[in-house]
Image (cartoon, rainbow, N blue to C red):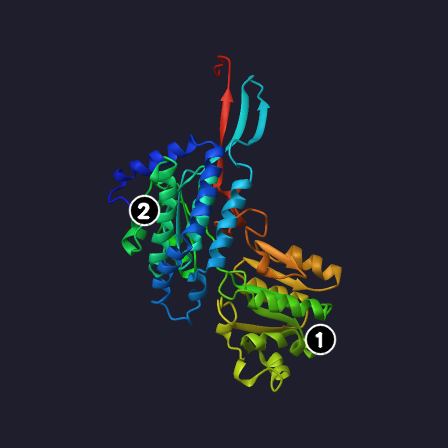
Amino acid sequence: MSILAETVADFSAIKQASRDALQLSNTTIDEVLRAVADAAVARTDFILTENQKDLDRMDPANPKYDRLQLTAERIEAIAQDMRNVATLPSPLGKIQEERTLDSGLRLVRKSVPLGVVGVIYEARPNVTFDVFALCLKAGNVAVLKGGSDAEYSNLAIAEVIHQVLEEHGLNQNLMSLLPASREATQKLLNAVGAIDVIIPRGSQNLINYVRENAKVPVIETGAGIVHTYFDKSGDLEKGQAVVFNAKTRRVSVCNALDCLVIHQERLQNLPEIIQKLASEDVKIYADQLSYTVLAGVYPDELLYPAFPEHFGTEFLSHKMSIKTVANLDEALDHIARYSSKHSEAIVAEDESVVEKYMQSVDAAAVYANTSTAYTDGSEFGMGAEIGISTQKLHARGPMALPELTSYKYLIYGEGQVRG
């Protein structure tokens, strides 16, 4: 198993793997991805046994538990994502610009890999497969640093990947899994000249730590503090379905709903909008106006008054806050104050309201009359994703193959010299 080199000089093997990756044909890459997908399914029992060791160390009530847990169905879905990545066209070698300069030089801008991509993530063993697949397809080397919560799972997955690489006669350092230690994190963050970019994937605390301590360039993937605004023109049936799906489909993921913002003229419909949430034991933290409407209607043991800390919180569990607003502008102000710029939605039939919301909300993904659960690279037709970027430089939204490339200029001449 490849681990983090003790000194920067020892990164030569990883840098060599980066050069080797440039020589791989797309046919070879796709064969490897399909082989890893098949191996993941074939070794499901082994992966699940190791995953159970991690689960046994975590309280099932922990919001991370669902993210950590693998099942046969989830492994099959992960494998299918890898097969989907294999069917996608290569993002490399794309001619982005080509022209002849006044000097007669021919200038070509072509897409190239980022190089060596370091990814730091928490209790999400699926990320090990996803990052390897996307990095390899985009010609990059992956250096992965998972959290201690998923140590056994990540080691098992890395073993499966390395076995396939060995069977295909490829450099094992195309994917390196680092020790689950703070020391490994520090070395990765300081590996200037060895790591080309670091992508943190996890909680806001993790992202902040990486941004504040890394000497290597960072692409942020943000936490999801997600709102859905139900306008006075909103359709009740649509709103019920959207809110229920966004909140309960999978509560531990970053596109899950955290706060329902509702127009005060639709408070009478609030019990109907959220009634199904009680069947999933969703705890509601309601502001004063919404609490008054829900008291005696929504189960008492699931209804609580909201305090300031319940807004701007990524719950990652069966919890949700409710904020009442007088108009669209107040809703926009609330979202602007608390949003993490990940995913935001509106339920409205008034086209002018929808358009203003879509134009005004500053987020990587903005939805009208549908669930924020769709913010996902696979759903967007990208095969898989390496994370959801909430920043605006280089990449934004689900990051997949195109976002794992850069470009370089190729200049062709016939002996010209500059005067």
Q: Residue 205 appears in which quarter of the rendering?
A: bottom left
Tell me the CA gap for discs 1 and 2: 54 Å
Indicate the secondary structure of the residue bearing disc 1. Answer: helix
Q: Which of 301/60 is in front?
A: 60
Q: Residue furthest bottom?
A: 296
Q: Tag 1: residue type?
A: Glu
Residue 12 x/y as whole percent = 29, 36
Q: Which of 134/198 is in front?
A: 134
Residue 324 x/y as whole percent = 62, 74
Q: Quick one: label 1, few (<14), some, or many (20+) residues within 10 Å?
A: some
**Label 2: which residue?**
190
Q: Looking at the picture, does residue 260 appear above or below residue 370?
A: below
Q: Is residue 403 left or right of 366 when viewed as pictured?
A: left
Q: Tag 2: residue type?
A: Asn
Q: Looking at the picture, does residue 353 appear above or below residue 323?
A: above
Q: Residue 60 appears in which quarter of the rendering?
A: bottom left
Residue 346 x/y as whole percent = 66, 63
Q: Is residue 327 left or right of 135 when viewed as pictured?
A: right
Q: Image point 65% across, 71% down: which residue?
A: 262
Indicate the secondary structure of the residue bearing disc 2. Answer: loop
Q: Which of 158/238 is in front?
A: 158
Compare marks 1 and 2 and give the one earlier in the sequence.
Answer: 2
Q: Looking at the picture, does residue 359 appear above or below residue 215?
A: below
Q: Is residue 48 left or right of 265 when viewed as pictured?
A: left
- On residue 265, which mark appears? 1
**Can residue 138 be seen in the rendering of this structure?**
no
